[in-house]
Image (tube, grey):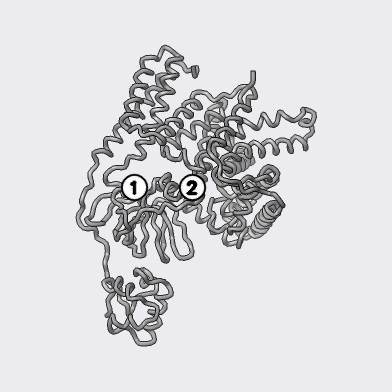
Amino acid sequence: MNNKKIPTGFLGVFCAAFCSGIVLAAYTRVSLPAFYFYAFLAFSCAAFSLDKSFRFGIFICLLAVFLGGTFFRNSQFLCADHIAKLTPYKSREAVLRGVIISDPVIGNRRTTFILDTQEVIINRRTRASGRVQVIFFGKNDFFYGQELTLEGKLYRPMNFSLGKKLRYRDYLQQQGIYSLFSTKRVEHLRKNQANPVQALAFWLKHKIQQILRRHIRGVPLAVLEAMLLGERQGIPAYLSTAMMHTGTIHILVVSGFNVGIVAFIALLALKIMRLARRPRYFVTILIIILYCLITGASLPVVRATIMAIAILAGKLLKREANVYQSLSLSALLILFFNPSQLFNVGFQLSFASVLALIALYPKIYALFPEKLCRINMLRLLIQVFSASSSAWLGTVGLVAYYFNIFSVLGIPANMLIAPYASLITAAALSLVFIGASLPALAFLFAASAELFALILIEINLFFSHLPHAYFNIPQLNFIYVFIYYAALILFVLPQK
Amino acid sequence: MFSLTQQEKTVVLFLLGLALLGLGAQALFKRYARVRDLPQLSFKKEKINLNNATEEQLVSLPGIGPVSAHKLIEYRQANGGFTDLADLKLIKGLRNQTLEKIEDLVVIE
């Protein structure tokens, strides 16, 4: 990593300009045709400046800004047969036909899933498109890719608040969901109507869940399912609150951290199996893509998967990988697909933490005298401290703004818990592997994974019960958060 | 700026041009999309026979939860089945609103 220069490159600048275009579109009333016209103008100017390097760069930046605006406006522009346009303002009886495109979440009395709508009957039967979140009351066997006909009530989501700045309706809209459907009557039509690779990934996920559930019970099972598969339904409220207060909740979200561990374990296992260098990287890329699909392709996992693929592909092609370029590429791909994700808290936290890790880590590490860094044990401690503190510094502003919490113990708790969490993930992965290949021996691995999970719970509860572990702070104005991040960037920028 | 070669610049411009064209085409498709009517959807509207319906089938009725379904089955077993829809009014906990909702969806045979 270069300490003096920040090699953001073309993709970094393009990504920043693209994001500012999205923000511009979100907070102004500039229409889609206007954005498109300006983008076309910038494109034409860039085409005529191919031989002038500086002018070309300026026009490409302008094009990125207007493209960002066009992408955002286009994503907000719904066609006439979109289910959002057919949903009445007041809840109304309707019949929907469509395909399940998410892994159904089964609760005590209800099952929730996302349906890709194909047809709807409200007054008359019409073609429809778009996603609907379905809440089915009762017991039924639902799975990904199933085509269904449902009879129930179609309505718009309420605008209640999850926090002061997080609204449920906005959150759903960021996922492309504008309508809800509650039902009790269902008719199963055909199976396997969606992506077969995703269906395979969910099948694997259920197999992994079966292995974990066969050997482990209670809260440790919930912790392992959350860490390995991103299934957080079983996590008790007291534990998630404690982890939020200690700033270690990210452990329970499948994130880049988990993708990194899976990639590391896969590379190590393939190396032990004496697989050659190139096939090893190639198989690891396939494994992390499958892992991304197994966990439901949540934002941080997609981000980490794209970054890991870019880095591994660089190694495969014997090219030097640039972390900034791969981070920018992952941000751009996510935003091309859904520009509204820029306003998603998960997106912001995920990118802020990784960016901080890349940019701040060397600065913080360099603050320690070289003499100390030469001692092995101390160097390890300094590395862990630098990583924890840079991630904490990168996210503390956003956490304070969105959740009104200031976690004092974030750095020491993460210094202990983050490395420990990799041990738990490795233990859980070993259990899954042994459970699938040598089930008779799985109880041994299950016992150790359960013990590790129990210790993690106890450490978290210990930290959260310490006096002044965290502070609830009043609602922050965004300007303070902006000043904080501007100061952070100034600290990171190279000084002349 | 960006230190791109002439070839790289052309590729970047070509890709961005394609994206721009695609965006315009997609926006036009959306703009001129119409709601297309279809013939009646073949949703099975089979009525549920209260005298042999399972608990799962009963729960699928609007306003009937697991508790009400259990009461319906208990009544059916104790009295040898329902003879008329009016029998439903004898079951405690079943509101008139619920009876109105389900009367078109059930049958007694």
Give the position of the N terminus of chain A as an image quadrant: top right
Q: Quadrant of the C terminus of chain A?
A: top right
Parent chain of label 1: A
- Estimate how packed mark 1 is, as few (under 14), some (14 to 19) or many (20 or more) residues with alpha carbons within 10 Å: many
Q: Which residue is mark 2?
A: A166
Q: Is residue A105 visible?
A: yes
Which mark is first along the chain, 1 or 2? 1
Secondary structure category for the residue under label 2:
loop
Amino acid at dot 1: Gly
Q: Residue furthest top?
A: A51
Q: Is residue A155 positioned above or below A271 on the image?
A: below
Q: Nearer the viewer, residue B78 or A339?
A: A339
**Mark 2 residue crowding within 10 angstroms, few (<14) / some (14–19) / many (20+):** some
Instruction: Read off the residue under disc 1.
Output: A130
Q: Foreground: A216 or A102? A: A102
Label disc, if present, on residue A360 of the rendered structure = none
**Label 2 is placed on what type of residue?**
Leu
Above or below residue B34? Residue A145 is below
Left or right, A214 with respect to A11, comes to: right
B7 relative to A286, above or below: above
In which image quadrant can residue B76 be found?
bottom left
CB atoms of marks 2 and 1 within 8 Å: no
Residue B37 location in percent, x, y? 20, 51
Instruction: Provide the chain ID for the residue under circle 2.
Output: A
